[in-house]
Amino acid sequence: MTPQQYIPLIAVGLALLMVVLRNRAPRTLRPQYLWVAPAIIVPLMALAIWGTSKQPGASHAPFAALDWVVLTVGLILGGVAGWWRGKMTTIEKHADGTLKAQASPIGMILIVILLLGRRALSAFLEPHAAAWGLNATAVADAFLVFVVGTIIVQRVEMYIRARRVQHGGTDSHVEATA
């Protein structure tokens, strides 16, 4: 590996370390703002996908039916990962009425596995996509759609549970692990 290839690995490692350290203690959860991250990410990802299909001189054709299937599978798998990650987040209501959320270490392990898996799959799938009759751009974009599905479904899951806890219910995750 060249030094240029180590830079992204070091950056991801530092980012993961910061996230793990930040998630050691519960943080204030404001359910009314859970829509903000998806509202920023979805248009950016849509723009990225649209941009890859509209590049001047691009050698790929517009997405065919199989390409849309690949994108849909990425979205569904991302939704499953997001639901699981959102479910693993503990949400508690404190005496002063504030909600506190703490990401599970299992959720952090999931993120690391997903990052490594994405890297391994993209390195394997993208060069072989044409041989399997797939559009390499659709395969790459499926990873973007996976991220979108993860973020949206995680936030929806957390919002539903936070509202339940806020109105006097219990966090089903805490009951399941207690």
Image: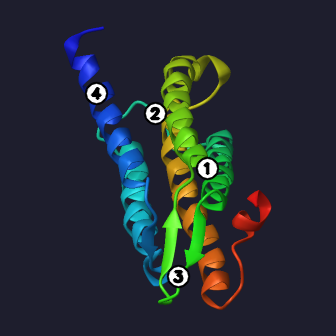
Give the answer, above or below, for where 172 lies relative to 130. Answer: below
- Front: mark 3 or 1: 3
Q: Position of residue 21 (x, y in %)?
A: 37, 47
Q: CA distance from mark 2 to mark 1?
A: 25 Å
Q: Amino acid at mark 4?
A: Ile
Looking at the image, is mark 2 or mark 1 nearer the viewer?
1
Q: Which mark is residue 10?
A: 4
Distance, label 3 to label 1, CA atoms, is 31 Å
Q: Which residue is mark 3?
A: 94
Q: Which mark is residue 78?
A: 1
- Few, some or many C-alpha atoms within 10 Å of disc 4 (few <14, some 14-19, many ≥20)? few
Which numbered disc, 2 or 3, marks the residue closer to the eye?
3
Circle nearer the N terminus (3, 1): 1
Say which residue label 2 marks.
Answer: 60
**How many C-alpha atoms fall within 10 Å of the one at disc 2: few (<14), some, or many (≥20)?**
some
Which comes before the other along the chain, label 3 or label 4?
Answer: 4
- Is residue 115 something one can see in this rendering? yes
Residue at image point 29% right, 40% down: 56
Mark 4 vs 2, N-terminal side: 4
Dot 3 falls on a residue whose secondary structure is loop
